[in-house]
Image (spheres, rainbow, N blue to C red):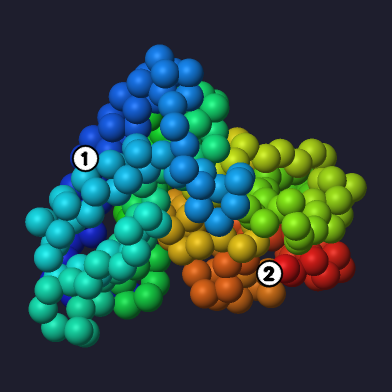
Amino acid sequence: MAHPDANLSDILNTAIGIARHAGGILREGQAAMRAQRGGALKFKSSDIDPVTEYDLRSEQYIVGELRRLYPGHRIVGEEGGEYAGDGPQSQPYTWYIDPLDGTVNFAHGFPMYCVSMGLAVEGEPALGVIYNPATDEMFAAAQGCGATLNGAPIRVSATSALSRALLITGFAYDTHTSDSNMGNFLAFQRSAQATRRIGSAALNLCYTATGQLDGHWEMKVQPHDIAAGIVLVREAGGTVTDFDGGDTMIASGRIVSSNGLIHAAMLAVLQAAGDRG
């Protein structure tokens, strides 16, 4: 795939710096919330879908930097919506920004949250940076450049049997009113070695890329949840598809990522479970 008038490795280095600074905003916010015994929370779609002032501060910083450095790029942020780029409408670059993925974890002081920045070129995820400030883990990847954790190369696992696999998933914010994904969860609980949930779709993809997890599936996710992680898993040697083995993850909100070796088996479980939301 050609990437017109841009060097992805240069953009990647810039995005790493932006994500690290945004992570500093979250780290300071975590300390402040701890001192305030949680502080005030607001809620979006439901009582289990919170937003903090630090989600907003992080996004404002990221968007400001991207608009300053790449004024022609379109930006889609979780909290602020869409920001059109300056210049021709044919500009092929779109950033998908989650300034704080894992807000519930963040609000409770649980150290599984992150900044996620994904760049799509002509609709295809091409670059991803995900930073967990609580653990100081910087995951980064660009198409054709490999994937790294704190600068060291990462690779998916070599687990070849689903029965030996450690999997991870997440549940949407409508989980109190919908059973979606529960059928899938039970099916994998019975067919894999074990299943986990940590509350961050972006980090689910990161730990699949590092090989600490063998596979991941999720539904009702947004583009800003997965755009960066898709690149990480693929560049670490893994496979990412939708539930049908296609490439509609961004549009459908249904994603399966794995080391590749267990991917067909995971798709078969999902097909049999039939729980698609």
Mark 1, other Cα within 10 Å: few <14 / some 14–19 / many ≥20? few
Closer to the camera, 263 or 249?
A: 249
Q: State the residue position of label 2.
A: 243
Closer to the camera, 15 or 149?
A: 15
Q: Position of residue 216 (x, y in %)?
A: 65, 51
270 relative position to 117: left or right: right
In what element is the residue under mark 2? loop
Mark sitting earlier along the chain (2/1): 1
| Number of numbered discs | 2
147 relative position to 71: left or right: right
- Residue at the image position 37 percent from the left and 55 percent from the top: 79
In what element is the residue under mark 1? helix
Quadrant in which the N terminus is drawn = bottom left
* Residue 77, visible in the rendered structure: yes
Q: Position of residue 196 (x, y in %)?
A: 71, 39
Quarter occupied by residue 245: bottom right
Q: State the residue position of label 1.
A: 17
Mark 2, other Cα within 10 Å: few <14 / some 14–19 / many ≥20? many
